[in-house]
Amino acid sequence: MALSFMIRKYQPDDIEQCRALWRELTEWHREIYEDSTIGGKHPEDYFDKHLAEVGPDQLRVAVYDSQVVGLIGLIIKGSEAEIEPLIVGKAYRCKGIGEKLITTAVSEARSKGVNFLSIRPVARNIKAIKFLYKRGFKNLGHIQLFLDFSNNTWKPGPKNVGCRFDF
């Protein structure tokens, strides 16, 4: 079921709702990685750092019934841009909000003459990867590999260039 919502520029009054969305995303990452330490005790503080680094003009929010239910950032550096973050509140997923946020960021990147637009979902966020793939993000630009000295639990993952990876 599609909702009637709007996408608009971030406003200073949105800060607490955006911090809550950032916390919700961090809790999802904790769940899929089975690691309660991701993001520390106050993961919403990372939204404050992100806001200070990229500036409010780079953020758009999805608003439904006067509540911020989604957030997207577009960081433009020369002819390249990155989407960071992309968050839709759990209760509002699969209702067209993520699609509209992505469409807004893609349109804005195109209008500013960007040649490459990237986004970096975490490897275990399979739903997000499939969602982004369906919206045209089909080119691999970078792969980040880890050596893990912490004894975290990794799951068998995808195969790429003939190598099997855990994620």
Image (cartoon, helix red, strand yellow):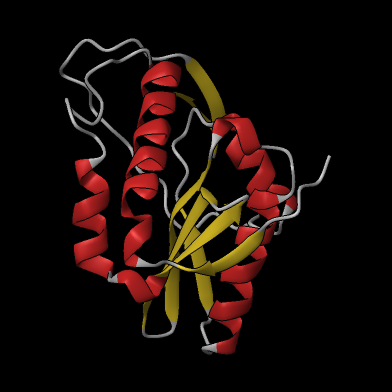
Q: Is residue 77 above or below residue 86?
A: below
The residue positioned 21% from the left and 20% from the top of the image is 37
Image quadrant assignment for residue 166: top left
* Residue 116 in picture, x, y percent from top left: 52, 74
The residue positioned 19% from the left and 54% from the top of the image is 49
How many marks are shown on the rendered structure?
0
* Along the line of sight, the residue nearer the viewer: 24 or 28: 24
* Residue 99 in picture, x, y percent from top left: 69, 54
Quarter the N terminus occupies = top right
Q: Is residue 75 visible?
A: no
Left or right? Give the position of 154 relative to 97. left
Q: Is residue 115 above or below residue 136?
A: below
Q: Is residue 34 above or below residue 137?
A: above
Q: Is residue 109 visible?
A: yes
* Along the line of sight, the residue nearer the viewer: 23 or 148: 23
Left or right? Give the position of 16 relative to 107. left
The residue positioned 39% from the left and 46% from the top of the image is 17
The residue positioned 35% from the left and 43% from the top of the image is 144
* Along the line of sight, the residue nearer the viewer: 139 or 78: 78
* Residue 39 in picture, x, y percent from top left: 23, 31
Q: Residue furthest right?
A: 1
Quarter the C terminus occupies = top left
